[in-house]
Image: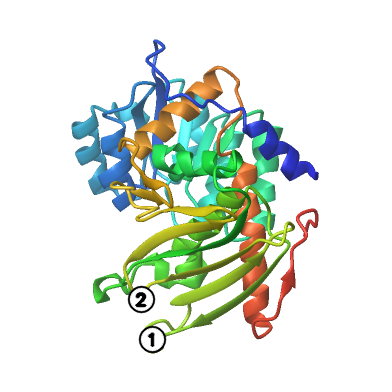
Amino acid sequence: MGFLGLALASGSAACRERPGRSGKKTGVALVGLGYYSRDLLGPALLETKETYLAGIVTGTPDKEKIWAEKYNIPGKNIYNYDNFDDLKNNGDIEIIYIVLPNSMHMEFTIRAAEAGKHVICEKPMAMNAQECRDMIDACNRNNVRLSIGYRMHFEPNTQEIIRMRREEDFGKVLQVTGGAGFYMPESMYDNWRMKDSMGGGAMMDMGVYPLNAARYITGLEPVSVTAQQFKTRPEVFTGVDEIASFQLDFPDRSVANLITGFHANFGHIRATAQKGWFGLEPFQAYGGIKGMSSNGPINFPQINQQAAQMDEVAVCIRENKPMRVPGEEGLLDMIVVDGIRESWANGGKRVMIDRNVRN
């Protein structure tokens, strides 16, 4: 087992219970106040038991007053991208949550680490695997913790299918099928998701959901990948992928066949095992996650995924416990994404994956 396997194996003992109120809450600052912060993370921080919204970082001055009034944020805890590094002097803020376009993840993770702050970074972790390694190194060097925003790992129905795989309720998993995507409307054509230089494209935005799910449903790391991409609106998607399909081979001879895209609204994952099947649909939505198996429904309570994620990260930091989703988890996905890009560049050829190679 390489260093990544060891890191994630140790993470299996991460804080598994939803934390209860333990006293003083941990201050979180959101970096980037777009849709995900405005409509999901901000409201979630009104429900959290272990964390609260202590500060914001934004490049849009008009947003400062709105957020300050809504969340009672003092002026000294409001930053922009130029004075971001001054966070090192702010004791109210312990965790920096990076909610920026993918091309900015590495820069602000490293800057947060050098300011002595723990980091939650949205998925995908970075533009490529080497950037992920640089982010992990920076956090280790500055003795701060790093977690990646794979919120589904904190969701009870998802946790149940992981348990089903781990305890082999239906025997060994043989095949995983699924995908995630949404229809990109004309109103989003100027969005960063349409710009390759900013880390756009369907694979980077939605494709990491089924990729990550295939890994947690098998409990294994793929040994090879083949990938294809195609477009229904080539006149629109001139610089990024609109639809991507990819196939994974795992070391136990199980396989995954997955798809992502900006061409339709969908989200499902299913594992076929020796003695039955299990899966989720939807599997990556912000709510309404539903499971089914050959034995019947999987019906665990719906929760605020983002609140559970941020609370658990805070408890793990406070109690020095392994993260459920450490930086290595994001790196492992990006190693495969790099392989997908290589396959695209070479006409869909099979690409062997080596997790120990550093650029």
For the residues bearing labels 2 and 1, Cβ distance under 8 angstroms: yes
The residue that label 2 is drawn on is: 263
Q: Would you identify the image quadrant in which residue 26 lies? A: top left
The residue that label 1 is drawn on is: 232
Q: Would you identify the image quadrant in which residue 351 lies? A: bottom right
- Please say if 141 is above or below 246: above
- Neighbours of disc 2 within 10 Å: few (<14), some (14-19), many (20+): some
Q: Which quadrant does the C terminus fall into?
A: bottom right
Residue at the far bottom: name it.
235
Q: Residue at x 41, y 81 (%)?
A: 237
Residue 280: horizontal and vertical position, in percent? 40, 53
Residue at the far top: name it.
23
The answer to whether 136 appears left or right of 68 in the picture is right
The answer to whether 171 appears left or right of 78 in the picture is right
Q: Amino acid at mark 1?
A: Thr
Residue 354: horizontal and vertical position, in percent? 78, 60
Q: Which quadrant does the N terminus fall into?
A: top right
Residue 106 seen by the camera: no
Q: Residue at x 31, y 71 (%)?
A: 183
Which element carries disc 1, helix, strand or loop?
A: loop
- In depth, the one of 181 and 178 nearer the eye is 178
